[in-house]
């Protein structure tokens, strides 16, 4: 019984040590360029401390700001060979 209590206590302590979940989103970073600039600087300075999730969101927000919604791919119509003129 004491072992179960010790394991439960250790689990609760470890769960309390985790970083709080980020409230940032890609959309909020796109809407706030100053915050995006700060996050990109944090990721550049210390990627491990900032975290993969936040740095990935910053990269996606930067891509969206630069590319916008993008343009859909529309292939050119096929080229048909023309017949040679007859003399």
Image: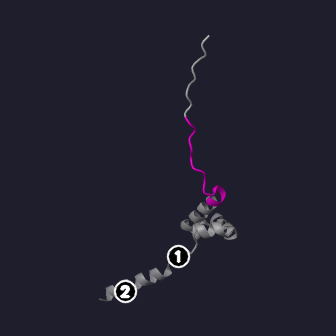
Q: Is residue 2 left or right of residue 35?
A: left
Which residue occupies 58% across, 66% down? 26
Q: Magenta stretch mostly in which secondary structure?
A: loop
Q: Quadrant of residue 40?
A: bottom right
Identify the secondary structure beneath mark 2: helix
Nearer the observer, 19 or 74: 74
Which residue occupies 41% across, 81% down? 11
Query: Mark 2 or 1, which is nearer the eye?
Result: 1
Decide: is 4 above or below 52. below
Indicate which disc, 2 or 1, sits on the residue closer to the N terminus: 2
Which residue occupies 56% across, 41% down? 75
The residue labelled by disc 1 is 21
Q: Position of residue 23 (x, y in %)?
A: 56, 75
Q: Quadrant of the C terminus?
A: top right
The residue labelled by disc 2 is 6
Q: Position of residue 13 (x, y in %)?
A: 45, 84
What residue occupies the far right of the structure in this picture?
34
Residue neighbourhood size for the residue with mark 1, other residues' Cα within 10 Å, grouped as few (<14), some (14–19), many (≥20): few
Residue neighbourhood size for the residue with mark 2, other residues' Cα within 10 Å, grouped as few (<14), some (14–19), many (≥20): few
How far is disc 2 from disc 1 in space, using C-alphas? 27 Å
Asked whether disc 2 touches disc 1, contact meaning CB atoms under 8 Å apart, the reply is no
Nearer the observer, 70 or 78: 78
Span of residues in magenta: 64-77
Q: Is residue 9 left or right of residue 58?
A: left
Q: Position of residue 80 (x, y in %)?
A: 55, 28
Q: Is residue 5 magenta?
A: no
Q: Which mark is residue 66?
A: none
Q: Is residue 10 left or right of residue 43?
A: left
Q: Quadrant of residue 4?
A: bottom left
Q: Quadrant of the N terminus?
A: bottom left
């Amino acid at each position: 019984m004491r072992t179960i209590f010790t394991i439960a206590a250790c689990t609760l302590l470890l769960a309390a040590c985790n970083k709080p979940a980020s409230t940032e989103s890609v959309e909020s970073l796109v809407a706030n360029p100053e915050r995006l600039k700060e996050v990109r600087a944090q990721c550049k300075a210390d990627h491990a401390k900032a975290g993969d999730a936040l740095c990935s969101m910053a990269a996606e927000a930067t891509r969206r700001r630069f590319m916008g919604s993008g343009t859909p791919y529309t292939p050119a119509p096929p080229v048909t060979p023309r017949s040679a003129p007859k003399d």
